[in-house]
Image: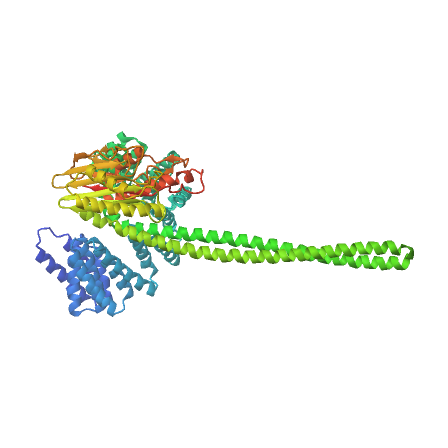
C-alpha cells in the first residue's frame, strides 16, 4: 500500500503546470489522507511521508506535501511526527525563499521537540534556525542558536551533528577575525571526527596552520608570522590529502593571501613567495579540472590568479581577466583583484574605492579590538623586560654569594693548614729535642720563627674577617640606597604621569577637535611620557584655529614649555581674532621674548618652539597659514601641495633682530582635501635596513599622498605601521638585536575638509 501511495504522488508531480495552486494543494492533501488511511501506526506514516518527499520533482512540490502532512498530523497524528513535519516544512520554505515562514515552522517544531526531549530533532532544528537567521543578516541571533545546538549535541554526545556545528562556529569566528577561537573549534571538530571513526582530518589540521598565520598577522607579530608561513609552505605536498575540492580551494587561497602578505613584510624574499603563490595556483587549477568544478574557477581561481598577476607586475594578463566581470562569481573576488591592479598601476583613488568596498565593515568592527591589542602587547612587553632585569639581578647576586663562599673557604683552609703546620712543627721539635739534645738551641730558634709566622697568619685572618664584616655592612647600605632609589623613582613616575594627565587635558581629544576643525585623526607619540610636541585648537565665530607645535626638548622641560605656549595661544588668539596667521605668530614671538628675563651678561633664554598655525573658514572655503620652521601639507585629488614655513623659531635670537615678521599663505580649499601638520619627530626617526637612515620628509610626503584617499582611522594605522616598520628594519635584516629607538616626540594631525 505504501508503494501505491508513492506511485500516486509521482504521477501527481508529473501533472501539467496548468493545474492551479488550489488544486495542487488539494491533491497533496488527498495523498496525505491516503497515507493516514493505509498506514496503521505513526512510524509507518512518517516513513511513507519521507519516501514521498524523496520522489518530489521540485522544492515547491516538497513544500506543498510538507504542509499537507503538517495539517493532517496536527489533527490526528503523533506529536513526535508533527515536530519532524514542521522541520521539513521549514526546510523547503527556506529553499523556496520564504525565510520568515521557514522560521515560523521551525520554532513550532522546536517547541514540540524540546517538550518531548527529542534531542536529535532539536539539534537539527536549532541548526536550521541558525542558518535561516544568518540568511537574514541576523548574525548575533544565528550565533546564539548554533551555540544552543552545540549544548544539546554535546549533552547527548551526538558527534555526527557536532562535526557540522563545530565547523560552522569556526567559520563564524573566522568571519569575525577571532582566529584563536576558530582554531579551538577546528580542534574540537577533529576530536569529534575521530570519535565517529573518521581519521581523515588533514583539511582541519592544515586550516589550523593557516589560521595561526592569520592570527600572527593580526597581532602584528611579524617574526612569528614569517616563521609560520615558511613552515606551512613546507607542508604543500599534504594538500592533496584533502578529499573535498572546496577544502583544497579554501586552503590554497588562504596560503596565496599569506604569501602575498609576506612580500610586504619581507621584500627581500619576494621571488620565493611569488613562486609559492604560483604552486598553490597550480594545485588549485589541477583540482578544479579534475573535479570539473567550474564554479570554483570563477569563485577562487580567477580572483586570486588575477591578483597574483597584478603583484607580479603582469598587468596586461591581469586586465585580460578583469575587463570582463563575468569571469568572477561575486563582487568580493572582483573588488579584491581590482584593488591590487589599481594599486600596482598607481591609481590610488580607484584603489581606495575598491579597498573600501572590500573592508569597510571589517575595518569598523575590528579597529577598536586592534587598538586594545596594541595596549596589551605593550604592557606584556614591559612586563617581560622587567622579569629579565630581575633575573639578571638575581644571577648577579648569586655570583657575589659564590665569591664570598670561596673567600670563606680559603680562610678556613688557611687556618686549618696553619694549625696543622704548627702541630707538625711541635711534634718535630719534641722529636728532635729528645733525639738530638745538641740541636736544642737551633730548634728553639726555629720554633720561635714558626710561632711568629703563626701570629702573623692570625693577624691576617683577623684583618680578613674585619674586611668581610665591612663588605657586609657596605652591602646593606647599598641595598638600603637601592630601596630609596626605587621609592624615589616610583614617586617621580607618578608625578610625571600626573603631568601627562594635565598636559592631555590641556590638549583636546580627537572628538573635541572634530567639533572645531571637522573629521580628523591624531598620531601623538611622546618620547618620555610627557611631550614637548603639542597641538591646540579653538573656534571663534566662523573661523577654526589649529596649531601643531614642537617645543625645544622633550620630557618634563618640553612639557613645561608646551603648557606655557598653549596659554599664550589662548590669550593672543582670543584678544586678536581679526589678525591673520602671520600676525598672530608675530605677536606670540614678541610675547614669548618679553616673558623671560635676561641677565646683565646678555645670557639669553634660547629655547622656544617651531609651529604651524592654520585658520580655516569653511564658509569661504579658505585656509590661512603661517609657520615657524614647520610646513603644512595639502593633498587635493592625489596632488600634494607643500606650504613652506619661515626658517625662524618662536624664540629670542640675539643674532637676528629683525625676524619678528612671518609670511602669510592664503589658499582655497575644496571638500575632500586632506590637510596635514606635523613635528620633526617622524622625518628625523632613524631606521631602515641599516638602522642609521632617517625616515625623511620626502618619504613622509609620498605616504601622505598615497593614503589621502583612505578614511582617517585607516590613515592613522598606516602612519603607525610605517614608522614601526621603519624602526624594525635593521632588526629584520639581522643587523640589530632590537628595533631602532624612538629619538624624539612624534606628532602628526590630519584633517579632511
* Depth order, front residue of 546/139: 546
Q: Nearer the viewer, residue 580 or 106?
A: 580
Q: Quadrant of residue 111?
A: bottom left
Location of residue 281 by image quarter: top left
Residue at the limit of the structure toward the front, as seen here: 600
Give the camera-side residue of 649 and 352: 649
In the rendered image, residue 475, in percent from the top left (x then y), is placed at: 55, 56
**Percent position of residue 650, x then y:** 27, 39
Residue 619 image-quadrant placement:
top left
Residue 467 can be seen, yes or no: yes
Front-most of residues 454 and 667: 454
Seen at 29% across and 30% down, the residue is: 314
Q: In the image, is 390 to the left or to the right of 110?
A: right
Q: Residue furthest top?
A: 316
**How many discs appear?**
0
The image position of residue 160, as x and y in percent, is 33, 58
Question: Would residue 269 appear left or right of 533 to someone viewing this image?
Answer: right
* Viewport quadrant of the N terminus: bottom left
The reply to whether residue 293 is visible in this rendering is no
Amino acid at each position: 500500500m505504501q508503494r501505491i501511495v508513492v506511485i500516486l504522488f509521482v504521477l501527481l508531480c508529473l501533472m501539467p503546470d496548468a493545474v492551479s495552486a488550489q488544486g495542487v494543494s488539494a491533491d497533496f492533501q488527498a495523498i496525505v489522507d491516503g497515507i493516514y488511511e493505509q498506514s496503521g501506526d505513526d512510524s509507518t506514516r512518517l516513513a511513507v511521508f519521507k519516501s514521498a518527499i524523496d520522489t518530489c520533482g521540485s522544492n515547491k512540490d516538497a513544500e506543498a506535501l510538507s504542509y499537507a502532512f503538517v495539517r493532517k498530523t496536527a489533527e490526528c497524528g503523533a506529536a513526535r511526527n508533527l515536530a519532524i513535519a514542521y522541520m521539513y516544512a521549514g526546510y523547503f520554505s527556506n529553499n523556496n525563499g520564504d525565510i520568515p515562514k521557514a522560521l515560523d515552522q521551525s520554532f513550532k517544531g522546536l517547541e514540540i521537540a524540546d517538550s518531548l526531549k527529542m534531542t536529535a530533532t532539536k539539534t537539527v532544528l536549532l541548526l536550521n534556525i541558525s542558518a535561516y537567521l544568518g540568511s537574514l543578516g541576523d548574525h548575533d541571533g544565528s550565533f546564539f542558536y548554533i551555540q544552543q545546538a552545540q549544548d544539546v549535541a554535546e549533552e547527548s554526545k551526538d558527534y555526527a551533528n557536532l562535526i557540522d556545528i563545530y565547523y560552522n562556529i569556526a567559520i563564524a569566528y573566522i568571519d569575525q577575525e577571532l582566529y584563536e577561537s576558530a582554531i579551538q573549534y577546528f580542534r574540537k571538530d577533529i576530536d569529534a571526527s575521530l570519535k565517529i571513526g573518521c581519521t581523515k582530518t588533514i583539511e582541519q589540521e592544515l586550516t589550523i596552520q593557516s589560521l595561526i598565520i592569520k592570527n600572527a598577522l593580526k597581532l602584528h607579530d611579524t617574526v612569528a608570522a614569517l616563521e609560520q608561513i615558511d613552515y606551512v609552505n613546507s607542508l604543500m605536498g599534504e594538500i592533496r590529502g584533502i578529499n573535498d575540492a572546496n577544502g583544497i580551494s579554501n586552503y590554497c587561497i588562504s596560503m596565496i593571501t599569506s604569501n602575498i602578505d609576506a612580500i610586504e613584510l619581507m621584500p627581500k624574499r619576494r621571488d620565493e613567495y611569488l613562486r609559492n603563490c604560483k604552486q598553490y595556483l597550480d594545485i588549485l587549477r589541477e583540482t578544479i579540472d579534475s573535479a570539473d568544478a567550474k564554479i570554483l574557477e570563477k569563485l577562487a581561481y580567477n580572483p586570486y590568479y588575477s591578483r597574483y598577476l597584478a603583484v607580479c607586475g603582469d598587468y596586461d594578463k591581469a586586465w585580460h581577466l578583469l575587463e570582463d566581470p563575468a569571469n568572477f562569481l561575486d563582487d568580493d573576488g572582483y573588488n579584491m583583484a581590482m584593488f591590487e591592479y589599481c594599486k600596482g598601476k598607481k591609481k590610488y583613488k580607484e584603489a581606495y574605492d575598491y579597498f573600501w568596498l572590500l573592508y569597510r565593515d571589517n575595518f569598523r568592527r575590528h579597529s577598536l579590538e586592534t587598538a586594545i591589542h596594541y595596549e596589551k602587547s605593550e604592557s606584556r612587553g614591559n612586563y617581560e623586560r622587567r622579569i629579565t632585569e630581575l633575573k639578571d639581578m638575581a644571577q648577579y647576586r648569586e655570583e657575589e654569594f659564590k665569591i664570598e663562599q670561596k673567600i670563606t673557604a680559603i680562610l678556613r683552609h688557611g687556618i686549618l693548614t696553619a694549625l696543622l703546620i704548627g702541630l707538625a712543627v711541635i711534634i718535630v721539635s719534641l722529636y728532635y729535642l729528645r733525639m738530638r739534645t745538641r740541636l736544642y738551641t737551633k730548634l728553639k730558634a726555629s720554633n720561635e720563627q714558626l710561632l711568629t709566622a703563626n701570629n702573623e697568619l692570625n693577624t691576617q685572618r683577623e684583618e680578613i674577617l674585619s674586611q668581610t664584616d665591612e663588605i657586609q655592612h657596605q652591602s646593606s647600605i647599598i641595598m638600603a640606597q637601592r630601596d630609596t632609589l626605587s621609592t624615589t623613582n616610583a614617586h617621580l613616575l607618578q608625578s610625571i604621569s600626573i603631568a601627562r594627565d594635565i598636559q592631555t587635558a590641556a590638549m583636546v581629544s580627537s572628538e573635541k577637535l572634530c567639533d572645531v576643525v571637522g573629521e580628523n585623526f591624531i598620531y601623538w607619540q611622546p618620547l618620555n611620557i610627557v611631550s614637548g610636541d603639542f597641538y591646540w585648537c579653538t573656534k571663534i565665530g566662523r573661523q577654526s584655529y589649529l596649531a601643531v607645535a614642537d617645543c625645544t626638548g622633550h620630557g618634563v622641560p618640553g612639557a613645561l614649555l608646551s603648557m606655557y605656549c598653549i596659554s599664550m595661544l589662548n590669550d593672543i588668539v582670543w584678544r586678536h581674532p581679526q589678525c591673520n596667521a602671520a600676525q598672530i605668530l608675530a605677536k606670540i614671538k614678541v610675547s614669548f621674548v618679553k616673558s623671560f628675563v635676561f641677565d646683565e651678561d646678555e645670557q639669553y633664554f634660547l629655547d622656544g618652539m617651531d609651529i604651524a598655525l592654520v585658520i580655516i573658514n569653511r564658509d569661504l572655503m579658505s585656509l590661512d597659514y603661517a609657520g615657524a620652521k614647520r610646513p603644512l601639507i595639502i593633498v587635493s585629488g592625489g596632488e600634494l601641495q607643500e606650504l613652506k614655513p619661515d626658517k625662524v623659531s618662536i624664540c629670542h635670537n640675539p643674532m637676528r633682530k629683525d625676524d619678528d615678521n612671518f609670511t602669510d599663505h592664503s589658499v582655497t580649499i575644496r571638500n575632500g582635501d586632506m590637510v596635514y601638520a606635523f613635528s620633526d619627530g617622524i622625518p628625523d626617526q632613524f631606521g631602515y635596513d641599516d638602522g642609521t637612515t632617517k625616515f625623511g620628509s620626502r618619504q613622509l610626503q609620498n605616504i601622505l599622498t598615497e593614503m589621502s584617499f583612505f578614511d582617517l582611522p585607516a590613515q592613522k594605522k598606516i602612519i603607525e605601521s610605517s614608522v614601526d616598520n621603519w624602526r624594525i628594519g635593521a632588526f629584520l635584516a639581522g643587523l640589530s638585536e632590537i628595533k631602532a629607538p624612538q629619538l624624539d616626540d612624534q606628532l602628526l594631525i590630519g584633517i579632511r575638509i
